[in-house]
Amino acid sequence: MIERHKQLLVPLPQGTVFKRLLTYAKPHWKWLIVAFLLLVGGAGAEILGPILIKIFIDDFLTPRTFDGQLLTLLGAGYLLLYISAAVMNYAQLLLFQKIALRIIQQLRIDVFARVERLGLSFFDQFPTGGLVSRITNDTEQVKELYVSVMAVFVQNIVFLIGVFVAMFFLNVQLALFCLVILPLILLIMQLYRHFSSKYYAEMSEKLSQLNARLNESIQGMAIVQIFRQERRMSREFQKTNQEHFNANFKSIKLDGLLLRPAVDFLAIVALMIVLSYFGITSFNSPVEIGVLYAFVSYLDRFFEPVNQMMQRLSIFQQAMVSAGRVFRLMDHDEIAPQKQGNSSPVIGNGEIEFRDVTFSYDGKTPVLKNISFHVREGETLALVGHTGSGKSSIINLLMRFYSIKQGKILIDGTPLEEFADRELRSKLGLVLQDPFLYVGDIEHNIRLYDTSIMEEEVKEAAKFVHAHPFIERLPDGYKSRVGERGTTFSGGQRQLLSFARTMAKKPKILVLDEATASVDTETETVIQSALEKMRRGRTTIAIAHRLSTIKDADQILVLHQGEIVERGTHDELLEKQGLYHKMYLLQQGAEWLEEMVSD
Amino acid sequence: MRVFIDLMWYFREEKWRYGGGVLVLALVSMLSLLPPYVIGVIVDHIVNDTLTLAILFRWMSVLFALAVTVYILRYLWRIFIFGAAIRLARQLRNKLYEHFSKMSSAFFQRRRTGDLMAHATNDIRAIEMTAGAGILTLVDSITLGGFVVLTMALTISWKLTIIALLPMPLMAYATSKYGSMLHQRFGKAQEAFSSLNDKVQESMSGIRVTKTFGYEAEEVASFKQESDDVVEKNIQVAKVDALFDPTISLIVGCCFFLSIVFGARYVVAEELTIGQLTSFTVYLGLLIWPMLAFGWLFNIVERGRASYDRVTRLLKAKQDIVDKPDAVAEPPKGELDFQIDSFSYQDGEELVLRDIYFTLPLGATLGIAGRTGSGKTTLIKTLMRDFEITNGRVLLEGRPLDDYSVEALRSSFGYVPQDHFLFSATIADNIAFAKPEADYKEIIAAAKLAAIHEDIVRFEDGYETVVGERGVTLSGGQKQRISIARALLADPEMLILDDSLSAVDAKTEEQILESLRTIRKGKTTLITAHRLSAMKHADLIIVLDHGEIIERGTHDSLMALNGWYQRVYDHQQLESLVEKGGEPS
């Protein structure tokens, strides 16, 4: 991993993460207020219930005065209250979830869009698996924060405030007594947060060690067995398993000491306060039993939300870590090279010139040294050389996947940097070495996202590259399904489809990165004839592995360790008896060798 | 609930923990009925004006003692029950690991790593849940629910209890209905999430195509569409999910309403005191949790059962290769006699080996050449008894392979596989893998023989450098040479290099082969390779094609034969010349 990617692994401070998560909620503020009001309404209605019962007990039941009409009103009011509470709570719960889902969607789109804009230099270095996990799994963790943590916290805090307001309304003095409980709860929460962040981190670290060990053992079991280390490995696994168990047991103890048991302890203490208060008051003055009833039932309702919130503290911790990872990726600054200048040049002829280009991926070891060449309209330039000689780097630069610091690349006399991305991508047709197919149908794989390509043009392109016959033979023709990575098609068929994809765009300049994968002779002939047709009338730059196919190239550059060591036409180069000549001899035996060495 | 019966063996094993836990749990349930009772008593005293400071103090002391006791008890049962549950998880994980280490490579070829891992992670977690939270929920909801209803009925009024509980069946019906709706919708939401995952995976793998055609914006738009689907499916889940709480609250509200309305009548009729009515409603509140818990229990148990079945099935997989009862425990020396008529992986399938007859004297070097898929690796694997030969046999020191115990046989081999595999540990640990007690001298000597010592000392931490996923990334050639050092340190009777010099350059290869020739004197060495220079000095070279020996001899005799060997050898010489840029070195 290179230096600049290391900071992607550094955790972001929690304060920053929290602030940024809040900004994501901002666009939804209107609906959040509605949801909030519904929540207050629902909680209020539920809190009013015991007050109605209190009125009933104190004003009707204790003095035994039953006014039929008033009672009906009271009863109907009570039921109505509960029904409206249910309706409001449902709407509120749903609304919060919807907002949370939308926020996460936005977060995902933002991080995905950011990653799409990163340069190939990033993708060439950073493992794909880690990226996918950040875009989907980490954001899913953040979803938990909004869905189950934020909603629960907001709801329960509102509920707690409601309970206190109701208590104050009933009896200010007693409510003040109960308020003493609050700092205690906050203290427990703080304690729990402090220890759990440590214990949970230890536990998840041990779990990932355990899984890593298991995964490694499964993959390397053959080695373990052949060197007869099963018992030792098993012992080591048991040790890690035991460490995980210990960490797990510690967190169970912590949960037992500080979660529900502690809160329930406080609940009984609070009950003692209420009962003592009423008991002592009753010595001097009469007590309203209804108020006592209401207080007791509020206490019950008070401690449930507290428990709910405590349970979610650990999810909160995890979500914050995940959010930090997502934001780190979103902040990563390694954008693909962009258009420079204000002019909007157009590629007309397709003339290419490299002027003294020197290039290095890491800024230290140069992979291209003083490369200069000139390809006129309609001509073919072939690049040959051993793996690592710099052929692919030339293509990477021409496609503007990487920006150059030394030298110049010109298309039709205009510097490469000045072209708009659209112009460049539509006029330069690159055929990749690894023909990547997408899940979908054949037609989609040829057209990709360009809706201006008509069905007829798709067929034309397929016919042009000789892919039409095999597509026609498929049961659903152009609508045939393509599975993951197109594994149901042969290597040759995949190549033809990728040719068709390029030809459908009718590029001015063709850039070929010839596949090394061996295909059967019959398909090989088809591919060769397709390539020849594609090159006709187009400026072509080709990396060729089969020297026989580039005999008719106008220019051949032989590269070795980033330098052009020979250049000329096929015949000229053969005459030189240099590297090209040796390669050619090697190639002559290649077909035979392929047959001999691979199956 | 059947999973509880399946897990009975464990409950028996841990009968003290579970017995204690259940007992404590029941005690806690019982004790939690006390506060409402105290409330009722105090209220009645207040109403009747009979409350004294002494009575109040006495009851408050009772409550405080209760608070402390319940706190301790609640802590205890957690330790008992959850502790036992994670012990089960630990035990099952160890069992699975031991089981894996007995399985042959055929087992690991059939099963995917991801799948095996899922057994040891997700499934065990689900079983742990069942043995912990499942038991808790079961005991808690039955005892607490039962006690509450009994107390309400016996100490206050059975009539009022029945009336108050009338809406409960409605709640049970509603929650189970929601449960099945949720299950379905949740499945769809998970599918949508998976397909989003696939989309991202595809986008990242196909990023070159996207960049080539300049379709970044379109890719994002298509991602947005997929994510819309995820949101839509999740909203469907939320619609059901949000029903639970309001429904339960509403029904509980109805219960309260009924008990107040009818309770008031009983108070007027003087069948009940106001204090009793107050206690009654508090009891009613205690029933909410057991109700919710019961629905939750079904959820846990269903998952636990599915997972337990999966794990059991895996543990039942049979060991492929077992020792004969009178197997020889003495490790054989490297004197080989191959007499294989034919071999195929499965009956009726294509033959992978046929007519393999040759002998190799003790201390000789064998080279096996041939194209990919010609049977080189299979031939070597039969020697290590990775699978049984059906037609024919291989003799070691004159005895058939299966006369030796697997342990003895394996201790005679040092194997360097094609796909070099290193463990996430230090380089020293990796080299000393087969002989953990080896000292630094031996480790360094082995590394020098494998021509990797120079590379290692150049690392910042030298031999203590951690390799593998969490450590530094090594090149293919470096990994190969560490694998070779690992096998050399074991100093085996027979050393097998299975195409394990492919990623080192010609010069290093020559260096390694040279040191092999000195230290392997008197011991048997087997080499397979694509690059024929690796076996140039072998005493016997066989060329395989479609599982048959087509050429055999020494390097010189094969070169004179003008066959496959000679042509490939010449070609490879030319190839290496081109690699060097055309200048012969």
Image: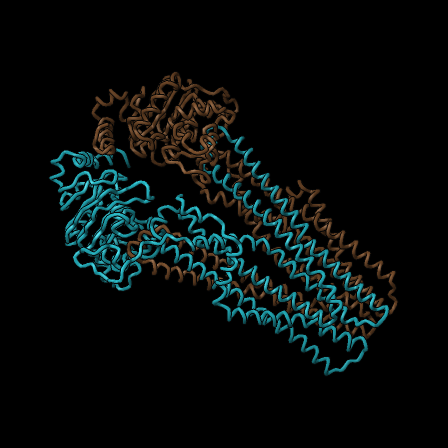
Chain colours: A cyan, B brown
Tell me the quarter of the image containing the N terminus of chain A: top left
Q: Quadrant of the C terminus of chain A?
A: top left
Residue B346 in sight here:
no
For residue B93, say whether it is visible: yes
Choose top left, top right, bottom left or bottom right for residue A246. top right
Q: Is residue B313 left or right of residue B467?
A: right
Q: Horizontal and vertical percent for residue A534?
A: 18, 52
Image position, residue B580 (x, y; %): 24, 32
Q: Position of residue A547 (x, y in %)?
A: 18, 40
Residue drawn at 27 percent across, 34 percent down: A597
Q: Residue at x 17, y 49 (%)?
A: A374
In the image, is A390 to the left or to the right of B64? left
Q: Nearer the viewer, residue B130 or A358?
A: A358
* Residue plotted at (36% across, 33% down): B477
Horizontal and vertical percent position of residue B546: 30, 32
* Total labels drawn: 0
Side of B144 where A396 appears, left or right: left
Depicted A334 relative to depicted A205: above or below: below
